Amino acid sequence: MEQPVTSSDALPPSRGRFYAVRCKPGEDLLAGLRSFVAARGLKAVSIVTAVGSLNTAPLRLANTGVWETRQGHFEIVSLVGTIDEQGEHLHISLSDRHGVTVGAHFGLGSAVYTTAEIVLVELEDYTFTRKPCSLSGYDELVVEPRRAD
């Protein structure tokens, strides 16, 4: 049986450097995060916590392969995922004014409503990349020790 692309269980723990980011009304949340990561040359980033609101939300619901954009006023109740130099894998949960919540993959094209406050951690001893996985059919996360530059 083919082994999935994965990181080694033998990797030691990584040191972390934390960043706090705020996206303002009208900004694309993911574009802002990508810009922040690129400007600092960060190689292995994870979202620690996020709060805020969106009025435009690009979502890909589970097992559909189809992106849809939802409009309205939504509270961000969760945003999780990993970001590297070439891409990201993010999931978001949003709640509307009735408390109806949806969770999905999150992509480019959002618009912040009032604010989006995100805390990121860069795992300083790792590099994240993504490689095709024959088991999932998607490019999946690969965690490697960071080489000295």
Image (tube, rainbow, N blue to C red):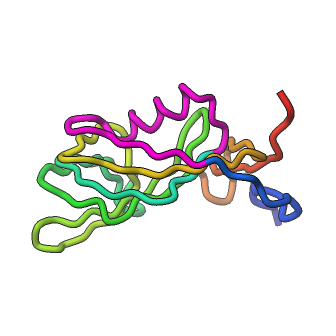
Q: Classify 118 as above or below 24.
A: below
Work out whether residue 8 or residue 53 is closer to the camera in this orientation and state it.
Answer: 53
Identify the image quadrant of residue 128.
top right
Q: Position of residue 147 (x, y in %)?
A: 85, 36
Quadrant location, the N terminus: bottom right
* Residue at x 64%, y 51% (from the top left corner): 140
Q: Classify 19 as above or below 49.
A: above
Q: Examine the rendering and report whether any part of residue 29 can be seen.
A: yes
Q: Position of residue 31 (x, y in %)?
A: 39, 33
Report the side of 93 relative to 45 (left or right).
left
* Residue at x 35%, y 38% (from the top left corner): 108
Q: Position of residue 69 (x, y in %)?
A: 23, 46
Identify the image quadrant of residue 77.
bottom left
* Residue at x 19%, y 51% (from the top left corner): 70
The stretch of residues the image draws in magenta is 18-44
Report the side of 134 relative to 108 (left or right).
right
Work out whether residue 133 or residue 111 is closer to the camera in this orientation and state it.
Answer: 111
Quadrant location, the C terminus: top right
Examine the structure image and report whether residue 102 is included in the region drawn in magenta. Answer: no
Report the side of 7 relative to 19 (left or right).
right
